Amino acid sequence: MLSQSVQVAVMQYKGGGDWYSNPTSVPNLVTFCNDELGTRIDAEVPYVEVGSPALFNYPFIHMTGHGNVVFSPSEARNLRTWLEAGGFLHISDNYGMDAFVRKEMRKVFPDLDWVELPFEHPVYHVAFDFEDGPPKIHEHDGDAAQGFGLLLDGRLVCYYDVECDLGDGWEDYAVHRDPEMVRRRALEMGANLLTFAMKGGRDD
C-alpha cells in the first residue's frame, strides 16, 4: 500500500506509433487502486516524453500503442538512467508493436534479454492472485497471453505484456464493451504491477 501521494504517467515516444491510444486506461487504473487498495495516486495522469528530464518525476510509467517505436540514443540513455534509478516501465502491446519494442529496448539495455516470468513470480500475487499468469483480455492472434520482464541486478525494471492487452482492459466500458469480470481482472493485474513497482520491483 502506498502511504504517500505519487503520480504515474504515460510515455510519449517517436516513430509514428500511437502512444496516445487508450486515454482512459491509466486514469481508470489509478482510480481502481485508490478505491480497492487504499493507495494515494494522483488522479491526473500526464504524458511524458521518453527523453525528458521529467521522466524522473514518476516511479511508474505505462507505454502502449499499435505500431512503430523509435528511441534516439539520448532517449535510450535517459530511459536507462531512469530505470537504473528505480523507475518501473510497463509496456502493453496494443497489437502490432512487439518487433519495435524489442528492437528499441535493446538500445536501452543491450546486455539484457527478455525473460518470460514464471507464474509463481510475485508480480502475479502481490495484491491479487493470477495462478495462470497474465489474463487474456483481447484475442489478437489467439495465442496465450504472456508476461516478459527485464531484470536488472535481480530487480524487475520493465514488465511487458504480449497477446494480453491489459491497457485495453483498463479502458472505459463503452470503448470495447468487455465483460465486467474481464475488465476487473485486467485492473487487478494492473494493480499488481503498480503495487510491485512501488515495492521496489524485487521478489523480497
Image (cartoon, rainbow, N blue to C red):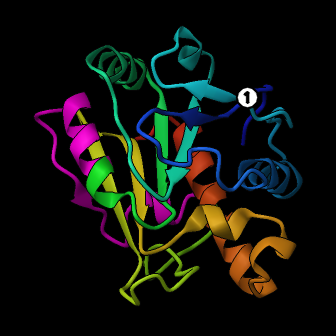
Q: Is residue 149 above or below residue 94?
A: above
Q: Is residue 100 above or below residue 157?
A: below
Q: Can see residue 74? A: yes
Q: Residues within 10 Å of mark 1 (few under 14, many from 20)?
A: some
Outermost residue toward the left?
111
Residue type at mark 1: give it.
Gln
Q: Is residue 19 left or right of residue 158?
A: right
Q: Which residue is mark 1?
A: 7
Question: Quick check: is 118 in the magenta stretch?
Answer: yes
Residue 101 x, y percent position in the rendering: 32, 48
Residue 179 x, y percent position in the rendering: 77, 88
Front position in the image: 157 or 160? 160
Q: Which residues are magenta?
A: 101-126
Q: Residue at x 56, y 52 (%)?
A: 193
Front position in the image: 188 or 136? 136
Outermost residue toward the front?
16
Q: Which quadrant would the C terminus be assigned to in this image?
A: top left
- Secondary element under disc 1, as helix, strand or loop, is loop
* Image quadrant in which you'd find residue 186: bottom right
Number of dots carrying numbers: 1
Residue 96 x, y percent position in the rendering: 40, 64
Front position in the image: 119 or 7? 7
Q: Residue at x 48, y 47 (%)?
A: 17
Q: Residue at x 26, y 57 (%)?
A: 99
Q: Is residue 29 left or right of residue 141?
A: right
Q: Which quadrant would the N terminus be assigned to in this image?
A: top right
Residue 27 x, y percent position in the rendering: 80, 47
Q: Is residue 70 above or below residue 27?
A: above
Q: Residue at x 56, y 33 (%)?
A: 12
Q: Can see residue 203? A: no
Question: Quick check: is 13 in the magenta stretch?
Answer: no
